[in-house]
Image (cartoon, rainbow, N blue to C red):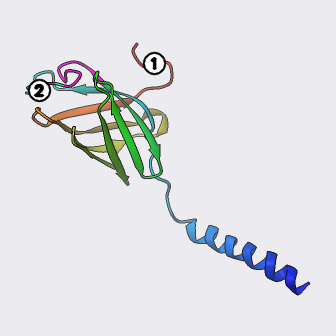
């Protein structure tokens, strides 16, 4: 009986302690999926990837507070991103993104600046697409 309590009871108590300690930790905002990007059509861009002068799109795959943003720009440029509260920051040799995430899960938006190589920083607004709406 003592062996049972030691081999089962102690791990169960440890697990319950871990769950209790993590109760107050908030989950990061969910931003994974397809996004439509609206930017300034007069953006100064010497070699615009996917042309920042038209609507751009990106896909985000997320794991916890880390995300990978893939631009649908004809080159599939990717940026590694971090989510800290409602702030998204991303960096890569292709450029940087700094944005604020707003809205509830079904109506999430982002606003910020994107700076790609060969381009001046451009203000943008991104809207998360619901499945089946991309490209419409």
The N terminus, quarter of image = bottom right
Query: Foreground residue, 108 or 90?
Result: 90
Estimate how packed mark 2 is, as few (under 14), some (14 to 19) or many (20 or more) residues with alpha carbons within 10 Å. some
**Residue 86 visible in the picture:** no
Residue ID at (73%, 75%): 11
Residue ID at (31%, 31%): 126
Vertical comparison of 71 with 101: above or below? above
Residue 78 percent location from the top left of the image: 32, 36
Residue ID at (13%, 37%): 121
Residue ID at (43%, 26%): 129
Estimate how packed mark 1 is, as few (under 14), some (14 to 19) or many (20 or more) residues with alpha carbons within 10 Å. few
Vertical comparison of 130 with 64: above or below? above
Residue 72, by quadrant, is top left
Q: In the image, is 84 to the left or to the right of 30? A: left
Disc 1 to disc 2, C-alpha distance: 26 Å
- SS of the residue at dot 2? loop
Identify the magenta region.
49-56
- Between discs 1 and 2, the one toward the N terminus: 2
Residue 77 percent location from the top left of the image: 29, 32
The question of residue 66 being in magenta is answered with no
Which disc, if any, is residue 133? 1
**Residue 51 visible in the picture:** yes
Residue 60 percent location from the top left of the image: 40, 36
The residue where tag 2 is placed is: 43
Count of numbered circles in the view? 2
Q: Mostly what secondary structure, the magenta segment?
A: loop
Q: In the image, is 102 to the left or to the right of 92? A: right
Which disc, if any, is residue 39? none
Vertical comparison of 5 with 125: above or below? below
Residue 9 percent location from the top left of the image: 79, 77
Residue sticking out furthest to the top: 136
């Amino acid at each position: 009986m003592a062996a049972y309590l030691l081999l089962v009871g102690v791990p169960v108590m440890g697990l319950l302690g871990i769950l209790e300690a993590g109760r107050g930790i908030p989950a990061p905002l969910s931003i994974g999926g397809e996004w439509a990007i609206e930017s300034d059509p007069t953006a100064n861009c010497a070699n615009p990837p996917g042309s920042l002068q038209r609507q751009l799109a990106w896909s985000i795959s997320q794991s916890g507070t880390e995300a990978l943003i893939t631009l649908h720009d004809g080159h599939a440029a990717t940026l590694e991103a971090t989510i800290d509260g409602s702030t998204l920051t991303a960096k890569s040799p292709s450029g940087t993104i700094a944005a604020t995430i707003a809205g509830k899960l079904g109506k999430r938006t982002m606003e910020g600046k994107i700076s790609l190589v060969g381009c001046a920083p451009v203000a943008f607004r991104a809207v998360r697409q619901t499945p089946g709406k991309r490209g419409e």
